[in-house]
Amino acid sequence: MTRRRTQRSTDGAPTLIDCDIHQRWKDESEVIQYLPEQYKDRGLQAPEILYDNVAEFSRRDAIPDDGSHPGSDIPKMKEQHLDEFGVDYAILTGNSYLNLSALPNDDYAAELAVASNKWAIDRWLSEGGPFVGSLLAAPQKPKRMAEMIRNLGQHPRVVQVVMPMAAQLPYGHEYYWPMYEAAEEMGLPIALHPYTEGHGVTRPPTGAGYPRTYFEWHTLLGTYAMGQLVSLVAEGVLPSFPDLDFVVIEGGLSWVPHFLWRMDKDWKALRAQVPYLEKPPSEYVKDQVRFTTQPIEEPDDPEHLLQILKMMNASETVMFASDYPHWDTDSPLYALPPMPEEMEAGVMAGNAQELYGLPDDPASLPTK
């Protein structure tokens, strides 16, 4: 890919918003203190990932000087990533290792979600500056999560809800709708983020079953996003919650055009099964769903990726994400092909600023 220009906007508007940065605690005790008494002895438990990168999951150069976890040190993150690239807003998406939807004890999963969110608000959002954050949700307890969204979602620096990509039921199921109602009420988009696929009580990570390697698992993450997205459309979530937006994080995006074509084709022949869809599925997706860039596909000819971006109207539907500090972190300088000026402005900052309602000046957002 070609190195792109980075410069500040002449009108003061953000020029780089990173939509996927993973913050982490240095020590589990930081979060455990927020758990109810009956769970403090249990600590932070989540099913271990079955598929992991043997070359390590996070960047070694992101390890803080004290040897703690990558993503746990604010000065290190600022120096290595935020200040280095001039990130105006860092949208924090939580600790990937917290596989909430993979836990069989739904009550514990819900309280773990609440505790981690309270920790993130106190530890990270109180820092101010570029940091805005997400509420992690345990989808197996939708009514408790709706309560949490209405409570913690009032914080001025909370900008979305993040649910694991994998769950026991597809996300279009009415079982989850209390969360959607709360998120729409609070004006918070819902993001889907991978990592739990095939772990704990979730379903197999591929339509073919359980793969053997991280290579297979990681290559097919986009197919899980497809399954959840078609469920949200076909079960009527998008038309039922017209003011609720969704974000697909870390699912790639080159599959989006052909996926929308296929949905529209089948809708024309099978409309009787989805009478609440009053327009082609692709129109609901274009209106209410956004996609992040990382892990961006890298064809030999960058022009081919640009064609994909044009097909999916990236000027309005795509947002930049780095996935810092993970092993496949994307640099804003090199990750994307040269784009038309309007598309680049939308992808790198404009679409995220509009979706999350972010002011031009991050310092104007209260920290509590």
Image (tube, rainbow, N blue to C red):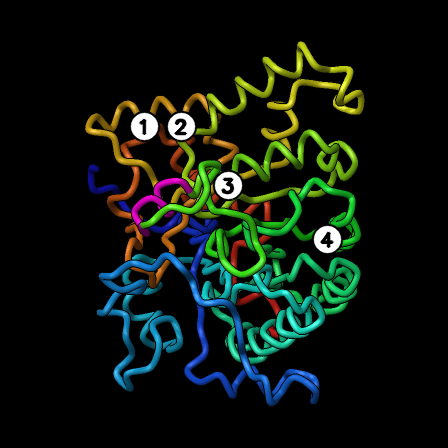
Q: For residue 183, which numbered disc appears in the image? A: 4
Mark 1: secondary structure: helix
Residue type at mark 3 is: Tyr
Seen as rendered, the residue at the extreme top is 269
| Sequence-wise first label, 1 or 4 | 4
10 Å neighbourhood of mark 1: few (<14), some, or many (≥20)?
Answer: many
| Sequence-wise first label, 4 or 2 | 4
Q: For residue 224, which numbered disc appears in the image? A: 3
10 Å neighbourhood of mark 3: few (<14), some, or many (≥20)?
Answer: some
Label 1 to label 3: alpha-carbon separation = 21 Å
In this picture, residue 153 sits left or right of residue 132:
right
What span is in magenta? 213-220
| Sequence-wise first label, 1 or 3 | 3
Residue 312 rendering spot, x and y as whole percentages: 47, 26
- Depicted 276 relative to depicted 86: above or below: above
| Sequence-wise first label, 4 or 3 | 4
| Sequence-wise first label, 3 or 2 | 3
Label 4 to label 3: alpha-carbon separation = 22 Å
- Depicted 50 relative to depicted 77: above or below: above
Residue underneath mark 1 = 305
Residue found at x 66% / y 18%: 280
Q: Is residue 86 visible?
A: yes
Residue 225 rendering spot, x and y as whole percentages: 52, 40
Please say whether residue 12 is one of the residues in the magenta stretch: no
- Depicted 1 relative to depicted 255: above or below: below
10 Å neighbourhood of mark 4: few (<14), some, or many (≥20)?
Answer: many
Residue underneath mark 2 = 309
Residue found at x 44% / y 73%: 24
Label 4 to label 2: alpha-carbon separation = 28 Å
Residue 162: which quarter of the image? bottom right
Label 1 to label 4: alpha-carbon separation = 33 Å
